[in-house]
Amino acid sequence: MPEFTTSALEWITLVLEERFGYVFTLRQGQSGLKLSLANTSQGYILFPKVEEAFHLSRSDFPCSHWDADRAGWISVLEVPLPAPGVNDLSEPVIEKKEDCFVINYDILGLTYWMLNRIEEIGRTDLDNHNRFPATASHAYKHGYLERPVVDEWLHILGQVIQCTWPALELKRHQFNMKVSHDVDGASRYGFSSFKGMLRGVAGDILKRRNFKSLLLAPLIHLNSSKKIHHADPANTFDWLMNQSEKHNMTSAFYFICGRTDAYRDADYEPEHPAIRELIRRIHNRGHEIGLHPSYNSFQYPEIIKAEANRLRNIMQDEGITQGELGGRMHYLRWEHPTTLQAWNDAGMTYDSTLSYADLPGFRCGTCFEYPAFNPETQKILDIRVRPLIVMDCTVVSDRYLGLGYTQEAEEKILELKNKCRKVHGCFTFLWHNSFFVGKESYYLYEQILSN
Ligand SMILES: [Zn+2]
């Protein structure tokens, strides 16, 4: 039977401490994993079951369900609760004994497996961008990708903790929303070559029947040397900041600071005067600057580090200091745990890549931010993981869900936002500055922020 290492146990107690606001200790004993409260010898919770599946990099194991409410507990979302890893979850799942509670489902193993993406390590069933796709995941195969399954189970565990130590006042979390914008293109025509601009115009006319760009494109192309032109279709920065400010939020803008793919990376250099002006403007309005590592950097820690340092230099030049420096991988490219370790070693504060490009939902089974852990080296890392719940194009674009800028897209996104709200977590949402086409797109964005 697999056992947690000491550092894995330490990491689990960190997660529990963040969630519940108390310091716990975890000890592996003869009868199972024993959860106690630090500084008291009274009461404990025993986990006798260890699911081997939670320590293996595969997705072909069963999933059961549990009607917690019928057993006298309270589900935070709909009944029944998915229980990955087991064929059949027989009652009682939670038993009260004389001196403790026994939980016959490996909630801590589930937390370890989901948050540390054990399932993805070394996988070869990847998509055309070498990404682990949603469709290969256990969560998708068993229909719970749109549920924050770890948060749901920790909600149950919280109730058992409360019954074990009735005097505790468990931490109350507040729902919040974080919006971020990957700056894949800062300007539609400002930084492209003359030829590139002409190609863009041809596309506008042939594909989008947009004849306006015949006049607009050369104008923008010639007038973007100091500042991104106000009429540029990708120049939605001020509008995005206005929207965030209306809702008392800050927007985070992640900049590409390297080119490892001539076609897929940005056409701007972050040192360009117009980008510097933009970075200053974002900062002066109280919003956040972050990093968007280039297309081929995900397997190369030294590239991620160099790109992070390039951004740091620009920020330093501009006199910008921020409490944290985070970001997200371009195309959500991610090799686990290589990319995570690379972010950590580049001295970044958080990463917000982990969602699937092909489907929205809870890739990590949670919408809460958490301390990262490298399952290969078994080391607790300094960086934090901020799971992404929805990326704009995942829901809107034809190559993924294909719902367009519609009511249906709005409903799908708000459904996920509401689940985050119900578990008092964080709805992390990505909308590219260059992803607005027509008034429906602006309307959709506003609806998501307002509801
Ligand atoms: Zn990107």
Image (spheres, helix red, strand yellow):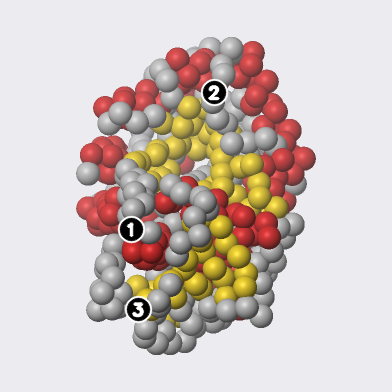
Residue located beneath label 3 in the image: 66
Which label is found at residue 322?
2
> Can you give x and y, in whole percent of width and height, for residue 21 in the image?
43, 47
Q: CA distance from mark 2 to mark 3?
A: 45 Å
Marks 3 and 1 in Cβ contact (< 8 Å)? no
Q: Disc 2 or disc 3, which is closer to the eye?
A: 3
Badge 1 element: loop
> Can you give x and y, in whole percent of width and height, for residue 12 in the image?
56, 57
Q: Is residue 85 above or below residue 349?
A: below
Q: Which three-letter amino acid code belongs to the residue tagged 2? A: Gln
**Where does the N terminus fall, quadrant-wise?**
bottom right
Task: Name the side, left or right, on which 420 lies relative to 16.
Answer: left
> Can you give x and y, in whole percent of width and height, for residue 425 in the image?
37, 49
Looking at the image, tell me whether mark 3 or mark 1 is earlier in sequence order: 3
Badge 2 element: loop
Q: Quadrant of residue 143?
A: bottom left
Which label is found at residue 166?
1
